[in-house]
Image (spheres, rainbow, N blue to C red):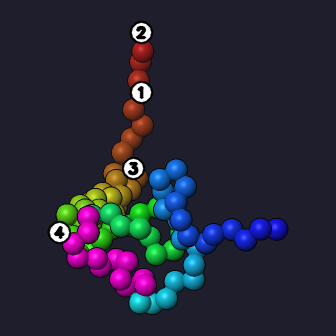
Amino acid sequence: MADRPSSGEIFGVPYNFDKPSFRRLLSSYWQPGEGMLVEKPFGIGYTVNLANWRSWILVAIAGALLYQEKSGSDESSEDDEESEPVEVIVD
């Protein structure tokens, strides 16, 4: 069987299946001068460049949404226990 390349692009999406080193992992997430998305150090696709200020906004929004989901699920479970069934009539 022919050897397949372990990194490259397919349909414009990068892939890399080389064994990642610690240095390559760190350098892929911190690339000053690059855009918000950079190639992943291992796997298929893109990841967030933490050297770009826009990626920190994205991380803050994701954290806020996660916090809201966690705190909202606690309140809704209490409401479900205390609420009574509602009858809906459709004409």
Looking at the rendered structure, which numbered label has been put on residue 53?
4
Q: Which residue: 41% across, 24% down?
A: 88
Give the mark, 3 or 2, whose residue is nearer the N terminus. 3
Q: Give the Cα distance between marks 3 and 1.
A: 16 Å
- Secondary structure beneath dot 1 equals loop
- In depth, the one of 69 and 2 nearer the eye is 2
Q: Residue at x 51, y 74 (%)?
A: 42
Q: Position of residue 85 (x, y in %)?
A: 42, 37
Find disc 1 in the rendering and name its residue. Answer: 87
Assess disc 2: are there few (<14), some (14-19) or many (≥20) residues with their C-alpha within 10 Å of its C-alpha: few
Q: Whole-Å distance between the Cαs marked 3 and 4?
A: 41 Å
Residue pushed farthest top?
Answer: 91
Task: Tell me how far mark 2 sits from mark 1, CA to CA.
Answer: 13 Å
N-term mark: 3 or 4: 4
Q: For the residue marked with disc 2, what is the amino acid?
A: Asp
Considering the numbered disc 2 on the image, is that residue within a helix, a strand or a loop?
A: loop
Q: Which residue is mark 3?
A: 80
Q: Is residue 33 magenta?
A: yes
Label 4: which secondary element: helix
CA gap between label 3 and label 2 equals: 27 Å
Which of discs 4 and 1 lies nearer the camera? The answer is: 4
Task: Sort mark 3 into few (<14), some (14-19) or many (20+) by Cα contacts within 10 Å.
Answer: few
Kindly indicate whether the residue at mark 1 contacts the one at mark 4 (C-beta within 8 angstroms).
no
Amino acid type at circle 4 is Trp
The residue indicated by pointer 2 is: 91
Q: Is residue 6 left or right of residue 58?
A: right
Part of the protein shown in magenta: 24-35
